[in-house]
Image (cartoon, coloured by chain):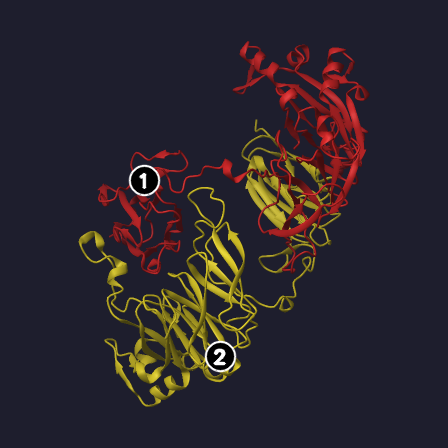
Chain colours: A yellow, B red
Amino acid sequence: DLFDSGKLVSEGWIFGNSFNTELATGGVETGAPPFEAGASQRDNDYMHVINLDKAAELFKAGRAEKIKDFSVLSLETIIEEGVLYFIPEPKSPHGVDVTPDGAYIVVSGKLDPHVTIYSFDKIMKTIADKNWEPDQFGVPVLDFDSCVEAQIEVGLGPLHTQFDNQGYAYTSLFLEPSVARWALGGEAGKKNSEPDWTLVGKVPVQYNVGHIAVAEGDTVSPDGKYLVSMNKWAIDRFAPVGPLVPQNFQLVDIDNSGDTMKVIYDMPIGMGEPHYAQIIKADKLKPWDVYPEVGWNPETQSVRLDYARQGKERIERDGKNVDIYMTLVRSHFKPEHVEVNEGDHIRWHITNVERAYDATHGFAVPGYNINVSLEPGEAQTIEFVADEPGVYPFYCSEFCSALHLEMMGYFLVKPAE
Amino acid sequence: DLFDSGKLVSEGWIFGNSFNTELATGGVETGAPPFEAGASQRDNDYMHVINLDKAAELFKAGRAEKIKDFSVLSLETIIEEGVLYFIPEPKSPHGVDVTPDGAYIVVSGKLDPHVTIYSFDKIMKTIADKNWEPDQFGVPVLDFDSCVEAQIEVGLGPLHTQFDNQGYAYTSLFLEPSVARWALGGEAGKKNSEPDWTLVGKVPVQYNVGHIAVAEGDTVSPDGKYLVSMNKWAIDRFAPVGPLVPQNFQLVDIDNSGDTMKVIYDMPIGMGEPHYAQIIKADKLKPWDVYPEVGWNPETQSVRLDYARQGKERIERDGKNVDIYMTLVRSHFKPEHVEVNEGDHIRWHITNVERAYDATHGFAVPGYNINVSLEPGEAQTIEFVADEPGVYPFYCSEFCSALHLEMMGYFLVKPAE
């Protein structure tokens, strides 16, 4: 992504892109170049190379100062102690991604048609040789040529890179729009027959792709086989339904070597914009079927101190404060009649006492704009003031059984005198 | 659904199910039967048969009275004028659906394994013959046997029925869970080779199905070919990720006749519960690509009186009231710098002046919890008090071009003295 951690040989370091080395702040309304032009004037921005282990040492040694309660290592300290280095990178860089073996760092400059590959060994040697010039703030800017391993022309608008198990890398091309496959060098390069650091093929995607995800494609052991292209625009891909167009995830088959990638499936995403995603093996998940104990609070991941227990359902009153303890089970609420006075301060404690998988219940009091969904074992407390007199039906809002429609009761708010 | 309109011969009438003829209100906490048991004691509830055209006539003739500003025809009036009739239906009925030719009304009683088919002709004759008994409120309850055309044993938990172009009906079975196909009678029954009013086949669905949708399956000219089963539970259908399980839409191929239905696709629904849906032909939609004019307010479907116009971007101040007129276009805001004073009342007028399809922009000021999405041509006004001094970046939150990341500006709130 925009920052990535080192792996294996580069463990303990992190690598981040930056843009706007120009320090532009915009101001088009006063005749200044608009922000996006002001921030794109120079040919280079800087990759940030950060020695995180060293920074942690300095923090432990008390070298951080407090700024508004945050511990901060000053620029002077991190320059002096060799925590931060810059390396020039092509203009308006976007993604930075570390190869599975940790030996290379891949940078995509979105206004440059190349991916630029830096060698971690070469970076370390350049630092050891002090082959740098300070920038205007004194940060060492390492010599570009001494750090670069290769540059590959992949196409227009390269953004992010992922990896597979065949020694290939994949880079999203926002402007073409396509996904490019290219051959890695080093040890990983021996896994395929293509020459190191060469473009192997491309597959058009529909349309402008941002991030991509290969199965475990950002780990030390990528799984390969499939890639998902997270496309920002869909335009003519689905039946048009108005000015808002869905984003589009496309599944790409990358199982064969060479120039053979194929889009095999489209999935529109109705809400939100697809950003970063990771594909992991399903057997790494060990999810609960139901919450471990009845009375569970999913926010704190613990049992609530004061939850509604089965057999102890009740309504307690202390002056104008009313505590309602209610349980939900297929297919009724207990209690079913709740009577309070106008102006009472209500705390409604509700527990779904089910222990069966997928036995979710809802609790809706539409007249008071309340609708809660409770998974098996979950307990919630709802607080409100009963400020409108009337008879308010409440009911289950998750279809729970053939008698779901009959899972209901009445909340009666008596008018004040 | 729970109510359906007449079609063709039955145009002008509506048919609705009811439950809880027992008038149970629950009260399990005081030893009464729980609501779902109290509401399920009798063998029959009542289908409501309503002469809507007649009701409209009575309204026009001034026969309605006002109750809290609503025009209401009293029960006495609608009984006297023949607007409302009841017909017994098997206990706890759920769906009522009118056949494409309008000649039959199909009722599913979810605690009864049959669908019950009423003939509109027979209902009209029973009314003409005054073959009824009044219920406790004086509503005429038509004789069941005189109105019923057929009953078909379809299976456990029948809920809703849709129709196709081959003379078949489809009923969702919540408890089995399956979708049943059965042959219609009358004119429609001649389209297939099965005997009228008989069960033809079933297809299991995964799992408990509520509504179903056949292509144009609730119209006078169903399209057939596909059915979507909207299943409430998914249980083992997808990789488990915790106590909340997605709902599951399944696509069923119904193109061949006989007992040949086949589930061909699963689609998990992550949010909300699938309820009613309709499948219509795509060419019936004539959507806009972009809003018809710049400055469009999608809520009122008209151009705003006071929107930010391209070339007229500005900041106006009147005492503590500040009006900001800002435009959005790939890839910048204008103005990019907005300076106000702590405590100012801000009205921020923003217009996406794009005329290109799918060129949506966002406007986010996270420090003030603002995030708006604007489709091409859309204008919005955001109002808030600038009550926290500071420098707040704002930026585009919909990926709009290769320079999307650079589409940003600054909102400066000067501290009060």
| Residue A264 x/y as whole percent | 55, 59
CA distance for labels 2 and 1:
50 Å
Q: Which mark is residue A7?
A: 2
* Quadrant into which the N terminus of chain A falls: bottom left
Q: Residue furthest bottom?
A: A129
Element under disc 1: loop
> Residue A252 appears at what percent x and percent y?
53, 63
Residue B294: mark in rendering: 1
User: Mark 2 — on which chain does it sit?
Assistant: A
Q: Nearer the viewer, residue A30 or B185?
A: B185
Residue mark closest to the camera, 2 vs 1: 1
Q: Which image quarter: residue B256? A: top right
Chain letter of mark 1 equals B
Report the amino acid beneath label 2. Answer: Lys
Q: Determine whether the residue tagged by mark 2 lies in a helix, strand or loop.
A: loop
Where does the image place residue B27, in percent across and percent down from the top left? 74, 35
Discs 2 and 1 carry the same chain letter: no
